[in-house]
Amino acid sequence: MKGLYLFGDFITGRLWALPLPERSDQYVRDPFALGRRDLLISTFGRDAAGKVYVTDFTRGVIYRIDPLP
């Protein structure tokens, strides 16, 4: 997940990742879809180990987002 900006849609539950450029003179590439979940995405977070989390507004549950192997 390093070097990616994650964002989601509150209503549809769709998640995307945007690869961030390494330098300020580079263009931002197109985002890619990470899928759709049955969530009302309210926020993202990261812990001290760098693991990324997303929260579901409806259920009040925190989910960890793991990259595919």
Image: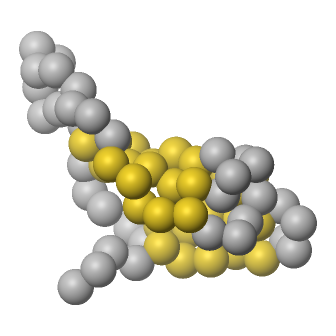
Q: Would residue 63 be found to the left or right of residue 29 on screen?
A: right
Of 39 and 50, nearer the camera is 39
For residue 50, say whether it is visible: yes
Q: Note whether 35 is above or below 17 in the view shown.
A: below
Q: How many marks?
A: 0
The residue lying at 77 percent from left, 58 percent from top is: 40
Q: Residue furthest top?
A: 25
Q: Quadrant of residue 23?
A: top left
Where is residue 9 shown, x and y percent of the image? 64, 46
Residue at the spot 25% in from the left edge and 42% down from the top edge:
19
Q: Quadrant of residue 31?
A: top left
Residue 51 lies, in percent from the top left, at 43, 72
Residue 12 in the image: state x and y as whole percent.
69, 52
* Nearer to us in this view, 35 or 68: 35
The reply to whether residue 48 is visible in this rendering is no
Residue drawn at point x = 13 percent, y = 34 percent: 22
User: What residue is rendered at 54% in x and 77% in y?
Assistant: 64
Image-based side of 42 in relation to 53, left or right? right
Q: Nearer the viewer, residue 50 or 28?
A: 28
Residue 47: give x, y in percent of width and height.
51, 68
What is the quadrant of the N terminus in the image?
Answer: bottom left
- The C terminus: image quadrant: bottom left
Q: How is the image coloured?
A: secondary structure
